Image (cartoon, grey):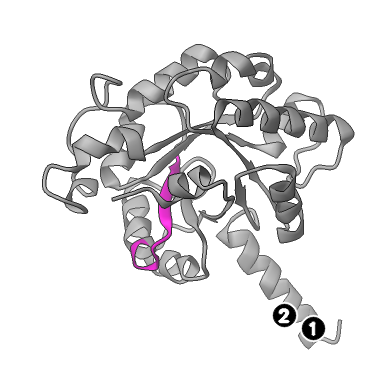
Amino acid sequence: MPNKVKAAWKAGKAVVNGWLAIPNAFSAEMYSQAGWDSVTVDMQHGVQDYLSCVACFQGIQPSGATPMVRVPWNEPGIIGKVLDAGAYGVICPMVNTKAEAEALVQYSKYPPRGTRSNGPIRAGVYGEAGGYQKTANDEILVIPMIETQTALDNLDAILDVPGIDAIYVGPSDLGLSMGMIPILDREEPEILKIYERLIKETSKRGIAAGLHNSSPKYAKKMIDMGFKLVTVGGNDVGLMVNAAKAAIKEARGG
């Protein structure tokens, strides 16, 4: 089945992404109905494991949002399993070198383009019989995270790796690597200059730049800057807690 995020990027559109830290199919189902273009299960910093990831995919599916995963690390076992479960995109943290980017592509692609093992236990049943293996290499998004000074130093080499579809910026870790506090919606001139560089370098290679955001206002600003994938609200927990706090404050008279 075609990847809607990839199709949107091809059409020059930005996509708004949701983020799941809660390991529950029901909350994933309700959250996914909000109108997200894609929804990402966070196996790195969310409280998700493989079984909850599968359950969340089942919750996401009725909405039509594109299911993606942030894996905990650049490791072939978990990357293969989330793809077998039906992930249409793999966001991988802490990709700092060309070799690490090449490994991520290898783990995500079937031969001859990679070393992924065959066994799409869930992903393979959605679509024509035998068709998944024919289209997976082209439809699955491979997205390394750029979130350290080392990655910035190696940016050109990482972006030039064949098979990379996009990059995803982790602002908190990027700030930490530069001696700053870990926050999302950054306004430091040096960070905004980095964002401009990332957009310029990805755009000229025909790949997308993504960014993790807190407020929808900031996410819109980043879309206007040129980012093609923006996550809003941090994650489902953040949106829920902030909405609850606002409701309580209003009920108590501000």
Q: What amino acid does circle 1 point to?
A: Glu
- For the residues bearing labels 1 and 2, Cβ distance under 8 angstroms: yes
Which residue is at a point 18% across and 45% down the rendered structure image?
Answer: 121
SS of the residue under disc 2: helix
| Region of the chain picked out in magenta, as a range | 61-70
Q: Where 124 sits versus 249, above or below? A: above
Q: Quadrant of residue 240?
A: bottom right
Q: Which residue is mark 1?
A: 250
Q: Nearer the viewer, residue 123 or 165?
A: 165
Q: Is residue 154 left or right of residue 178?
A: left
Vertical arrangement, residue 60 with respect to residue 249, above or below: above
Relative to 185, say whether 166 is above or below: above
Q: Is residue 76 left or right of residue 97?
A: left
- Residue drawn at (53%, 34%) of the image: 166
Q: Residue at x 57, y 46 (%)?
A: 12
In the rendered image, the residue lying farthest to the left is: 129
Q: Which residue is mark 2?
A: 247
From this viewpoint, is residue 94 visible? no
Q: What amino acid type should be assigned to the residue bearing mark 2?
A: Ala
Q: Position of residue 54 (x, y in %)?
A: 32, 53
